[in-house]
Image (tube, grey):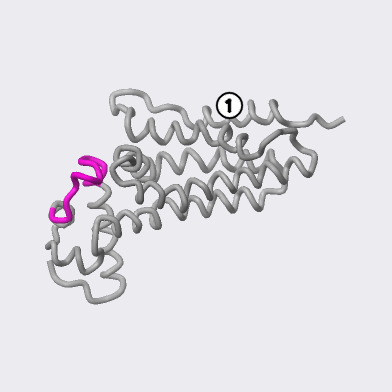
């Protein structure tokens, strides 16, 4: 394959390499995946791969930035800009199924869990850049709603985990347990049910 010379061509090749890396990490695990196999999957030479990424760790960091960070930015925007708790939950209900069904983020989650003990630095990186920010955004949303008198909760950080639990479980289910022969889980209905239960459980009824 000819060397990419324009910025658009370089970006396209970079995305091809990231896709190949995610496939290798997902199928073999981060520890077993080799740079040579990633290059072969992308139909490129190993030397070409090293022009873009110096290591598997650099590839994984780039996957976090391309797959996880943009979705986190969207969730933070929902959490910070929604005028009410109910509207924030409604927007999350719409966004979450799309994030699970139409992105490769669940596959990245599976890689993290599979190799978390072997590569603690990778796990720490994902937690610092994604998990803690996500929990913090939802906790802040809950805290503001409490201050406005919309909901009644104790620890916003703990409640944030309850709000996010079905989304995280569904992402892992999609990556690990989903079977093409089975009817997909109706995530739209599932998350709507969850949101309604949460709103009823912690919402303060208006007089």
Residue named by callout 1: 193
* Residue 135, x across and y down, in percent: 55, 44
Position of residue 104 in the picture relative to residue 70 (left or right):
left
Neighbourhood count class around disc 1 (C-alpha, 10 Å): few under 14, some 14–19, many 20 upward: few
Tell me the SS state at disc 1. Answer: helix
Where does the C terminus fall, quadrant-wise?
Answer: top right
Q: Quadrant of residue 160?
A: top right
- Rendered image quadrant of residue 15: bottom left
Looking at the rendering, the stretch of residues picked out in magenta corresponds to 23-36
Q: Is residue 137 left or right of residue 166?
A: right
Q: Residue at x 69, y 41 (%)?
A: 85
In the image, taking residue 16 as reference, residue 178 lies left or right, namely: right
Position of residue 17 in the picture relative to residue 102 (left or right) = left
Work out which quarter of the rendered image holds the N terminus and state it: bottom left
Expressed as whole percent of the image width and height from the top left, the position of residue 43 reads 14, 57
Residue 176 is situated, as x and y percent measured from the top left of the image, at 32, 31
- Whether the magenta-drawn stretch holds residue 31 is answered as yes
Comparing 191 with 112, the one in front is 112
Q: In which quadrant of the rendered view does residue 118 lie?
A: top left
Nearest the viewer among 89 and 166 is 166
Q: Identify the residue shown where x is 45% and y is 43%.
A: 99
């Amino acid at each position: 394959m000819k060397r990419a010379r324009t910025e658009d061509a370089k970006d396209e090749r970079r995305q091809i390499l990231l896709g190949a890396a995610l496939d290798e990490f997902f199928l073999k695990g981060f520890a077993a995946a080799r740079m040579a196999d990633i290059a072969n999957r992308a139909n490129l030479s190993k030397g070409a791969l090293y022009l873009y990424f110096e290591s598997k760790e650099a590839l994984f960091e780039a996957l976090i930035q391309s797959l996880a960070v943009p979705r986190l930015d969207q969730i933070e925007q929902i959490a910070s800009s929604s005028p009410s708790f109910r509207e924030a939950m409604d927007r999350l209900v719409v966004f979450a199924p799309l994030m699970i069904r139409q992105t490769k983020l669940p596959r990245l989650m599976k890689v993290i869990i599979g190799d978390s003990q072997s590569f603690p630095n990778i796990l720490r990186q994902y937690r610092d850049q994604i998990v803690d920010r996500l929990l913090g955004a939802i906790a802040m949303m809950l805290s503001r709603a409490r201050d406005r008198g919309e909901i009644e909760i104790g620890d916003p950080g703990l409640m944030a985990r309850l709000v996010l639990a079905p989304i995280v479980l569904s992402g892992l289910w999609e990556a690990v347990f989903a079977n093409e022969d089975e009817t997909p889980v109706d995530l739209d209905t599932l998350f709507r049910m969850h949101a309604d239960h949460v709103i009823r459980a912690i919402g303060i009824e208006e007089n």
